[in-house]
Amino acid sequence: MPPSTSIDDHVVGVEEDEDESDTETVTTAVTTSTLAPHAKRSKSETPEEKRARKQAVKEHRRNRRSEKKQTTQLFEAERVKQERERVYERESAVLHL
């Protein structure tokens, strides 16, 4: 079966990979909110619809910035945690000698 790709509201790129034995199918999904459904406009939109669309896009961008900041903070905290663990392991290895 060839890999399939579909676009849903919040799922971008659902791939199915089959093992050589055809007994197991692995499905991976990348969840993202980078697609702004509000960004599409019709040529006949009214000024009120335009304002609402632009406001929705601004809100979407605001949310993405917040998500990005949270992700950055989580990765930084994890990096610091792993660095502390490495230092602790080195110190405990030296003490056992």
Image (cartoon, grey):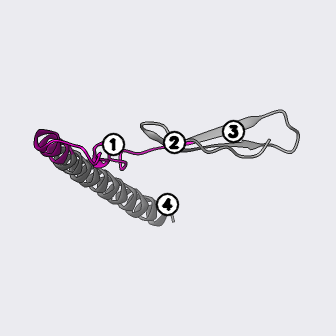
- Mark 3 lies on residue: 26
Task: Find the magenta span and give its range.
Answer: 29-56
Check whether the beta carbons of the residues at disc 4 and disc 2 lie within 8 A of each other: no
- Labels 2 & 3 near each other (Cβ < 8 A): no
Quarter where residue 83 is shown: bottom left
> Which of disc 2 and disc 1 is earlier in sequence?
2
Q: Which of the two labelled residues, at mark 2 and mark 3, occupies the earlier sequence position? A: 2
Q: How far apart are marks 1 and 2 (CA)?
A: 12 Å
Q: Residue 69 occupies which quadrant of the picture?
A: bottom left
Q: In this view, does 16 lie to the left or right of 29?
A: right
Residue highlighted by disc 4: 96
Which residue does the numbered mark 2 point to in the structure image? 7
- Category of crowding for the residue at label 1, using alpha-carbon neighbours closer than 10 angstroms: few (below 14), some (14–19), many (at least 20): few
Choose the circle earlier in sequence order: 4 or 2: 2
Q: Which residue reaches farthest front?
A: 44
Contact check, label 1 and label 2, Cβ < 8 Å: no
| Above or below, 9 relative to 84 | above
Is residue 85 found left or right of 51 in the rendered image?
A: right
Q: Position of residue 57 (x, y in %)?
A: 21, 48
Residue for badge 1: 37
Provide residue 97's location: percent of width, then percent of height. Answer: 51, 66
Q: Is residue 4 magenta?
A: no
Residue plotted at (21% across, 43% down)? 45
Q: Which tag is nearer the camera, tag 2 or tag 3?
A: 2
Q: Are marks 1 and 3 in contact (CB under 8 Å)?
A: no
